[in-house]
Image: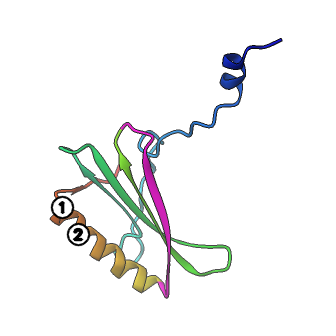
């Protein structure tokens, strides 16, 4: 009979951190606007990222993720936007707010 400690190792609910996930290069669109951005706050060891994606119904959705660098704590939110242009405007507004709070945009790989 297995002990509970052994069973816990088999069925772990721990997810890998978004920070430790391999980063992929972000290619700009033809109009020069970026649909994915990531900001890092080096002093507070925090990150914030956004991605403008289409859902299964063809609607535009803004995926926002945040958390601690090297931590499994954080959150995410999906926000419906009316159009791609409205989503790009929200990304620019989020970037402005992140810079005001001391975040720096992470360079593309």
Determine whether the residue tagged by mark 1 lies in a helix, strand or loop.
loop
Q: Give the residue number, with chain letter if any, for mark 1.
A: 101
Residues shaded magenta = 70-83
Task: Indicate which disc residue 20 carries.
Answer: none
Identity of the residue drawn at 38% across and 78% down: 88
Binning the other alpha carbons within 10 Å of mark 1 as few (below 14), some (14 to 19) or many (20 upward) gives: few
Q: Position of residue 28 (x, y in %)?
A: 39, 67
Q: Give the residue number, with chain letter if any, for mark 2.
A: 97
Please state which of residues 4 and 70 is positioned toward the viewer in this rendering. Answer: 4
Q: Position of residue 35 (x, y in %)?
A: 41, 70
Binning the other alpha carbons within 10 Å of mark 2 as few (below 14), some (14 to 19) or many (20 upward) gives: few
Identity of the residue drawn at 21% across and 56% down: 103
State the residue lying farthest toward the top: 1
Identity of the residue drawn at 37% across and 36% down: 70
Q: Is residue 6 visible?
A: yes
Question: Do tag 1 and tag 2 residues touch (Cβ < 8 Å)?
Answer: yes
Q: Quick check: is 54 in the magenta stretch?
A: no
Q: Is residue 31 visible?
A: no
Q: Position of residue 1 (x, y in %)?
A: 83, 11
Q: Quick check: is 72 in the magenta stretch?
A: yes
Q: Position of residue 92 (x, y in %)?
A: 29, 75
Dividing the picture into quarters, in which one does residue 57 lie?
bottom right
Please state which of residues 35 and 93 is positioned toward the viewer in this rendering. Answer: 93
Please state which of residues 26 and 45 is positioned toward the viewer in this rendering. Answer: 45
């Amino acid at each position: 009979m297995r002990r509970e400690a052994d069973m816990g190792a088999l069925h772990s609910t721990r997810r890998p951190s978004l920070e430790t996930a391999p980063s992929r290069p972000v290619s700009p669109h033809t109009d020069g606007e970026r649909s994915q951005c990531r900001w890092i706050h080096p002093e507070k060891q925090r990150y914030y990222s956004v991605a403008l994606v289409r859902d299964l119904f063809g609607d535009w959705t803004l995926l926002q993720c945040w958390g601690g660098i090297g931590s499994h704590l954080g959150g995410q939110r999906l926000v419906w936007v009316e159009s791609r242009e409205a989503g790009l405007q929200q990304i620019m507004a989020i970037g402005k707010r992140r810079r005001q709070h001391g975040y720096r945009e992470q360079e593309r790989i």
